[in-house]
Amino acid sequence: MISPQQQRAVYNNQYAQAAVNGDPRYQMKQYDRAGVSRGAGAFNQASIQGGKQLAEGVAEAYRTRGDMQNYNQGFAMQQQQADMQQAQALAGLYSQQAYQNQMAQQQRNNMGMNFATGLLGGLLY
């Protein structure tokens, strides 16, 4: 299971990385060419690329958070199923034990009746 603190840390890290990638100054580096000065066109392209990177990064952060929540829900469901199976198994064992106890009590009662019948039968003959 992924703890809420871990989920928050992963989300914050991905969101921060998206913010870095979305900065036009960071994107501008890929358009730099030796001996060519930076122009408005290069800055415009860097801004467009930064916007795309920011949108994709934020979407990925939300997608990852959703995936982690889905994982936790699936894990919780599996745990509940395992608990239910264990409870059913224990209930079966307890009912079997109760049946054995009843049968033992009945056998003791029968033995007592047989003893009493044999004792009385011996006195009557």
Image: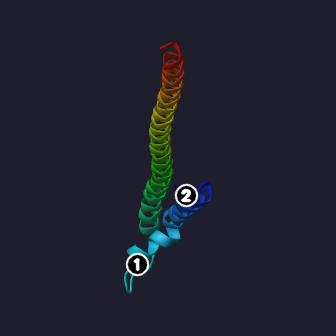
Residue 20 at least partly seen = yes
Residue 25 image offset from top left, x and y in percent: 52, 71
In this rendering, is residue 74 above or below 10? above
Q: Position of residue 75 (x, y in %)?
A: 47, 47
Badge number at residue 32: 1
**Residue type at mark 2?**
Tyr
Residue nearest the observer in this picture, 91 or 118 = 118
Q: Position of residue 38 (x, y in %)?
A: 45, 75
> Hey, which quadrant is residue 85 in on the image?
top left
Vertical position of residue 50 compared to residue 77: above or below: below
Amino acid at circle 1: Asp
Q: Residue at x 37, y 81 (%)?
A: 33
Residue depicted at x 48% and y 51%: 68
Residue 103 x %, y % = 47, 28
Pick the residue in front: 124 or 13.
Answer: 124
The residue sitting at the right extreme is 5
> Which type of secondary structure does the marked residue at label 1 adopt?
loop
Point 49% across, 35% down: residue: 97
Residue linked to disc 2: 11
* 85, 80: nearer the viewer: 85
